[in-house]
Amino acid sequence: MTTSWKEYTDLERSTARHIFEALRQRDDLDFQSSDSQSDESPGDSHRLVSFSELFDAVRDPARQIDAEFSAVLSANPRLAADLRQLIANLASYQAPRLAAASTGTIRRREGDGFAMEFRTSRVGHEQVYVSIRLGAPDRRAPEVLFVSRAGGVLLK
């Protein structure tokens, strides 16, 4: 049986965060130790990424997916897949991709407990306004929004 992150209590989530932080600190120490034993420093694309770093990328609103982290994800498809799976597992709301055969302009999409409306800017057609309406008052409002662009690039 799989349990969703949102099913845990605040205390259980807090405890998990502390455990992940301790594991991250251990991972950082291990990485620094192995790095100091080598004269070569790994490039950004070969950098080790701990589970807690992936977890922070998904749950921490202040943690951005910067160029360095994007380079690591691009160089490691398995890590990128792990990140996407973690996002899917922790998401309060999720809108799957549209089918490739979809035609015309998309004005509205609905999902489980939410609706999104898209409006093209009058200033420029390359700008689109997105309104998200949450209709499930029993769910906690999301603090992070991920957008998956063509080619698998994630925006946070």
Image (cartoon, helix red, strand yellow):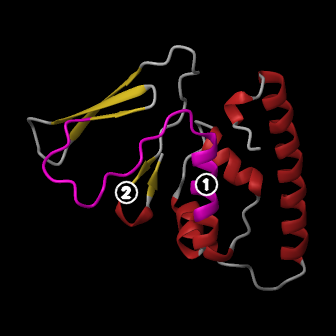
Along the horizontal axis of the image, is 102 left or right of 147? left
At label 2, which amino acid type do we have? Answer: Arg
The residue depicted at 27 percent of the width and 61 percent of the height is 100
Q: Nearer the viewer, residue 120 or 62?
A: 120
At label 1, which amino acid type do we have? Answer: Gln
Q: Nearer the viewer, mark 1 or mark 2?
A: 1
Q: Earlier in the sequence, mark 1 or mark 2?
A: 1
Residue linked to disc 2? 149
Residue linked to disc 1? 85
Q: Nearer the viewer, residue 39 or 113?
A: 113
Decide: few, some or many residues near mark 1? Use Cα within 10 Å; few <14, some 14-19, many ≥20.
few
Magenta residue span: 81-108
Q: Secondary structure at mark 2?
A: loop
Q: Secondary structure at mark 1?
A: helix
Task: Tell me the quadrant of the picture where the N terminus can be found.
Answer: top right
The residue depicted at 84 percent of the width and 67 percent of the height is 31
Report the magenta stretch's main SS: loop
